[in-house]
Image: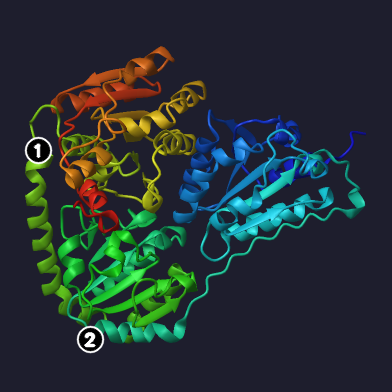
């Protein structure tokens, strides 16, 4: 009989958890797990860089709202994974990072790839576990799964020393717990107070963030705004939980987006802030009127009151909260009165929306050459017009322009790097999206700078048969940095900002994909049609104007109150 070792216990625990994929780059310290995942129902999805493995796990977790597993080897494998974990933390993605490390018997002996890993990652995760007894590996994997999904989702770290993975196990000492905790706490006592504040308001606004997506609260949210006649803005993973095309949804809550967001947020007298963070994207709360009443609902108690005093803080699962408030409104029969009361406010917001979009129309319809980058975003947005089309956005200015333009019709179909702002997510996110949704169109739009970080993930897509389409908005520079320097100093520093032209499309062709070069706006949609029709991993390399400055570049130029003497 084959002996049972720690690596087999780890593999079997993942199999028992019905894990579909382990996103990974191989290494000697994790081979004891690999050998027992081979030929199992768990697929090892191998990438070209550990960063990409964690980004894929992050995207998978965000789309499925379930734990996703990344696995890396010791030392440099571990450190390469850190950017992805930091991104997962701010996107609330339930990622489990399993890392090998040197054996306990080799600590402080200067073994290969030795480093103290757990203290490095502890501030970046919900919890860091280190298993030092082989028989307890299933217990630690159970704890990792429970922790990443409890309360607000987030990443968890599990370290397994290689001698523990290779150790022979006494099965009499092994416990195999498998606990799934599903809880939807709701603060029923405070729900009537929300309704009273609504009755007293004239210009209320609802802002729904990632919590709406992770709680699967789209239907309840839509019923709430329809019943009470409330305007809605969405942000983060909450984009699309109620379609941007819904008459009460005014698209993204980002103030820089053309439309109604800036004026509405600045003039609202009541803010219902649901499952979101009062971050930079809301000028740390300063975009709202100081005298506006503020209601914050969040699953994480420590989030309530960040950056602003709130008038009513409610610790609740968002789906449970919305279900409760919908029932109370129905029971009290307040819906008709609220809808009539807020109709003039909705009419005002629609004027804001019309005026804001009209101001951006010249950019969206620009015919200049090189192409205006937001015109490229418009062409992509119009082409990717199916409800279940998936668009990934990556890059500095490029992500800004796409975020200002994308119409999101369904939750989980728009992925960007969010608050962490880490470049290089484009191809890994897109690969994960296509892996999960092989029958849907998946497009990644990226800057040329961010493309370079994980360029070889094109090769991953090609050899794994993932026909994603990547559009490169190529301004031949680190555009956001270049422009912010120009705003700060009157010029950019060529070293560190200018990249020059690269035929990325030909590089993808040489690896076996489809490549095409585009200069004119009218050629974008035909190029996208050809790229998707090719059935291959495709690269559409688009030359855009390097002189156009985005609102994101303006914000970066003012970062930290920088002043030029």
Vertical placement of residue 313 versus 537, above or below: below
CB under 8 Å between discs 1 and 2: no
Write down the quadrant of residue 30 in the picture. Answer: top right
Q: Dot 1 corresponds to which residue?
A: 365
In the rendered image, the residue lying farthest to the top is 510
Vertical placement of residue 24 versus 555, above or below: above
Residue 550 seen by the camera: no
Residue 427: x and y in percent read 42, 33
Q: Left or right? Give the position of 565 relative to 361.
A: right
Q: Dot 2 corresponds to which residue?
A: 200
Residue 285: x and y in percent read 29, 69
Secondary structure beneath dot 1 equals loop
Q: Which residue occupies the foreground of this view, 384 or 352?
A: 352
Q: Which residue is drawn at 51% across and 21% down?
A: 463
Between label 1 and label 2, give the one nearer the viewer: 1
Q: Residue at x 53, y 28 (%)?
A: 48
Residue 239: x and y in percent read 33, 54
Q: Which residue is drawn at 31% across and 66% down?
A: 284
């Amino acid at each position: 009989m084959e002996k049972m070792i720690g690596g087999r216990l780890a593999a079997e625990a993942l199999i028992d958890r019905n894990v579909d994929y382990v996103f990974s780059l191989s290494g000697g310290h994790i081979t004891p797990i690999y050998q027992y995942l081979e030929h199992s129902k768990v697929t090892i999805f191998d990438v070209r860089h550990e960063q990409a493995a964690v980004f894929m796990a992050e995207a998978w977790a965000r789309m499925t709202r379930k734990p996703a597993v990344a696995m890396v080897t010791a030392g440099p494998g571990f450190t390469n994974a850190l950017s992805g974990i930091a991104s997962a933390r701010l996107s609330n993605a339930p990622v489990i990072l399993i890392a090998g490390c040197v054996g306990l018997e080799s600590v402080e002996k200067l073994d290969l790839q030795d480093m103290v890993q757990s203290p490095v990652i502890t501030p970046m995760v919900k919890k860091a576990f280190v298993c030092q007894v082989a028989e307890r590996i299933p217990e630690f994997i159970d704890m990792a799964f429970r922790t990443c999904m409890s309360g607000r989702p987030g990443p968890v770290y599990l370290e397994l020393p290689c001698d523990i993975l290779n150790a022979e196990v006494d099965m009499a000492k092994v416990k195999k717990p498998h606990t799934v905790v599903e809880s939807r706490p709701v603060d029923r006592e405070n729900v009537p107070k929300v309704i009273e504040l609504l009755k007293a308001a004239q210009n209320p606004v609802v802002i729904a963030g990632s919590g709406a997506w992770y709680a699967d609260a789209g239907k309840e949210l839509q019923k709430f705004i329809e019943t009470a006649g409330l305007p809605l803005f969405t942000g983060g993973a909450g984009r699309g939980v109620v379609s941007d095309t819904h008459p009460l949804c005014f698209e993204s809550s980002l103030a820089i987006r053309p439309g109604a967001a800036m004026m509405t947020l600045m003039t609202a007298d009541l803010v219902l802030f649901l499952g979101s963070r009062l971050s930079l994207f809301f000028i740390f709360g300063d975009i709202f009127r100081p005298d506006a009443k503020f209601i914050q609902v969040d699953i994480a108690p420590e989030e309530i009151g960040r950056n602003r005093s709130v008038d009513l803080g409610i610790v609740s699962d968002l789906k449970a909260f919305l279900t409760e408030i919908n029932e109370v409104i129905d029971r009290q029969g307040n819906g008709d009165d609220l809808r009539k009361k807020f109709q003039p406010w909705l009419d005002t917001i629609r004027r804001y929306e019309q005026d804001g979009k009209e101001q951006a129309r010249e950019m969206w319809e620009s015919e200049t050459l090189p192409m205006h980058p937001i015109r490229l975003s418009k062409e992509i947005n119009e082409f990717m017009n199916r409800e279940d089309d998936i668009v990934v956005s990556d890059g500095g200015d490029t992500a800004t322009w796409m975020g200002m333009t994308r119409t999101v019709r369904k939750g989980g179909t728009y992925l960007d790097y969010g608050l962490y702002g880490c470049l290089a997510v484009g191809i890994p996110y897109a690969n994960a999206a296509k892996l999960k949704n092989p029958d849907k169109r998946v497009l990644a739009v990226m800057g040329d700078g961010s493309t370079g970080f994980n360029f070889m993930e094109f090769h991953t897509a090609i050899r794994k048969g993932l026909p994603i389409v990547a559009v490169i908005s190529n301004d031949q520079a680190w555009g956001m940095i270049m422009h912010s320097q120009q705003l700060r100093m009157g010029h950019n520093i060529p070293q560190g900002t200018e990249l020059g032209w690269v035929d990325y499309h030909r590089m993808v062709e040489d690896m076996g994909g489809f490549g095409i070069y585009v200069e004119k706006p009218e050629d974008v949609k035909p190029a996208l049609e050809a790229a998707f029709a090719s059935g291959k991993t495709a690269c559409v390399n688009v030359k855009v104007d390097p002189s156009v400055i985005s609102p994101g570049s303006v914000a970066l130029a003012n970062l930290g109150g920088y002043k030029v003497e």
